[in-house]
Image: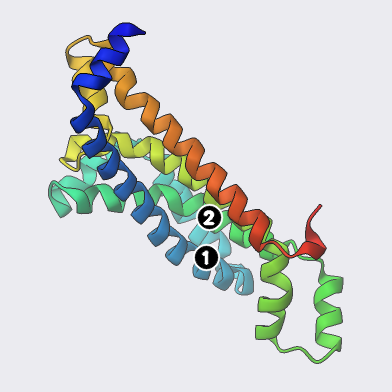
Amino acid sequence: MQVFLETVSSRQDLIIERTIEHLYLSFLAIIIAVIISVPLGIYIARKRKVAEFYIGITAVLQTIPSLALFGFLVPILGIGTTTALVALIIYALLPILRNTYTGITGVDEGIIEAGEGMGMTSRQILWKIQLPLSLPFMMAGIRTATVLTVGVATLATFVGAGGLGDIIWRGLQSWNNSLVLAGAIPVAIMALLFDFILKFVEKKVTPKGIKS
């Protein structure tokens, strides 16, 4: 423990710098993935014939090993933050897209028919019935994608995008377990913190009427 604390103290500036880089990559990737996946999930929930096509594409992309995906993107996008962001966004798409689709299509048809009987338009049904009822599913997808993204972002160091993976890799190269932990522990804390914040947000935005 003393060796670990000394390592953290001596590398404090580097750890803070890499943590900020890691936080930036993870947060931006999740925001962009949500912007892409939620509207697409709503669209395929209304056009169910094409749902398996879009979900299938994101599923296939996620089966590509993460390090290989980074490697595939380098010849196209070069080395740097852009390559890392694109890879992280690709990995975050599937959980959000699938949960959005599942949540909306899982709303009881009887409730939708009741809304139609009251004269609600399809847009009103979406905003006042389907989205509120599917919100727990959507948030679960976002939370899953966030934890996954924070972990995969450690590989960003291999494309010159920095992050806490740089510290972990330095520790592995020098057989320095304390340095590995100095990079790995902040990653774990960051993932748990993001998950806690999103869980709190989920509770706040979920309508009281559908809370368990």
Badge 2 is on which residue? 96
Q: Which residue is drawn at 48% across and 48% down?
A: 59
SS under mark 1:
helix
Residue 140 makes an appearance in the image: no
Residue 62 makes an appearance in the image: yes
Q: In this view, does 171 lie above or below 94?
A: above
Q: Residue at x 57, y 55 (%)?
A: 98
In which quadrant of the rendered view does residue 9 lie? top left
Q: In this view, does 40 lie above or below 199?
A: below
Residue sitting nearer the eye, 9 or 106:
9
- Mark 1–mark 2 CB contact (< 8 Å): yes
In which quadrant of the rendered view does residue 128 lie? bottom right
Instruction: Judge from the rendering whether residue 5 lies leftward or rightward of residue 132; answer left or right.
Output: left
Q: How crowded is mark 2: few (under 14 residues within 10 Å), some or many (20 or more)?
A: many
Residue type, mark 1 in image: Val
Badge 1 is on which residue? 38
Q: Residues within 10 Å of mark 1 (few under 14, many from 20)?
A: some
Which comes sooner in the sequence, label 1 or label 2? 1
- Residue 189: image location, x then y, percent: 44, 32
Q: Residue at x 20, y 50 (%)?
A: 81
**Residue extending farthest bottom:** 119
Q: Residue at x 84, y 79 (%)?
A: 113
- Residue 94: image location, x then y, percent: 49, 51
Residue type, mark 2 in image: Ile
In which quadrant of the rendered view does residue 131 lie? bottom right
SS under mark 2:
helix
**Is the N terminus in the top left, top right, bottom left or bottom right quadrant?**
top left
- Residue 130: image location, x then y, percent: 71, 71
Instruction: Judge from the rendering whether residue 181 lies leftward or rightward of residue 73; answer left or right.
Output: right
- Residue 161: image location, x then y, percent: 19, 43
* Colour setting: rainbow
Instruction: Judge from the rendering whether residue 21 lies leftward or rightward of residue 58; answer left or right.
Output: left
